[in-house]
Image (spheres, rainbow, N blue to C red):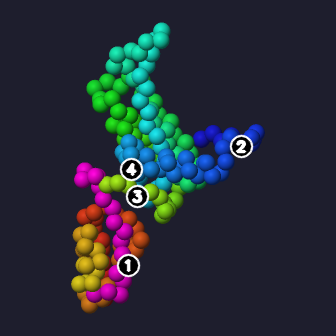
Amino acid sequence: MEHNSKTEIRKVISEETSEIMRYALETVVALGGGKSAYIDGYRIGGKTGTAQKAVNGAYLANNYIMSFVGIVPSNNPEAVLYIAIDNPKDTALLSSYTTTPIARRILLDIIDALVIEKQDGGVEKDWEWTDKVYYEVEDVVGKTPEEAKKLLEHFTIEYSGSGGKIISQSPEAGTRLEDGSTIKLMLG
């Protein structure tokens, strides 16, 4: 990976305008056409684009460039991603269907490569019925199995050991998991 040093020449926009724009980009990914680039627990900002190509001042029929530009994390960007697909075939003419799934896969690699931490405070995704839903794991250590079952209603629970109280749990409280994921509880 290549790193270049920065030399600030001038400020192009104010901090306030930058914050507003980054929030707007985050809402595109959480609530708008960029939903397929959403990554639970990470603040992703982005914008899709569809441009009809022109030659000699006239638009070409069925000839487009689909694009997506994204930032991660949107509140303090460490990376910028730009994807453009020139005249994709056999797809809907919307960048939200062509570029954002690819962007999501690349953004996951960027998150791993730059060791970007999960964080709270982002715009929550507007979930659709086809989306995977995530829930936060509650702390059930010290509780009875009946209490734990109520608190972990969105998960599958596997018990080990014996006793009337939970002495440990995996994964730990605060972890966000997909609906139906397995939580292991140790009784003692």
In magenta segment, residue 102: no
Spatial CA distance of label 3 from label 1 is 22 Å
Residue at the image point whose x is 25% and y is 79% from the top: 150
Q: Earlier in the sequence, mark 2 or mark 4?
A: 2
Which residue is label 3 attached to?
124
Q: Earlier in the sequence, mark 3 or mark 2?
A: 2
Q: Residues within 10 Å of mark 2 (few under 14, many from 20)?
A: few
Q: Is residue 67 left or right of residue 157?
A: right
Q: Earlier in the sequence, mark 1 or mark 4?
A: 4
Amino acid at dot 2: Lys
Q: Earlier in the sequence, mark 1 or mark 2?
A: 2
Q: Nearer the viewer, residue 170 or 176?
A: 176
Q: Position of residue 36 (x, y in %)?
A: 36, 45
Spatial CA distance of label 3 from label 2 is 31 Å
Q: Residues within 10 Å of mark 4 (few under 14, many from 20)?
A: some
Q: Which residues are magenta?
A: 128-144
Amino acid at dot 4: Leu
Which residue is label 4 attached to?
31
Which residue is label 1 attached to?
139
Residue 11 is tagged as 2
Amino acid at dot 3: Glu
Q: Are marks 3 and 4 in contact (CB under 8 Å)?
A: no
Helix, strand or loop at mark 2: loop
Helix, strand or loop at mark 4: helix
Q: Earlier in the sequence, mark 3 or mark 4?
A: 4
Q: Are marks 2 and 4 in contact (CB under 8 Å)?
A: no
Helix, strand or loop at mark 3: loop
Residue situated furthest bottom in the rendering: 164
Spatial CA distance of label 1 from label 4 is 30 Å
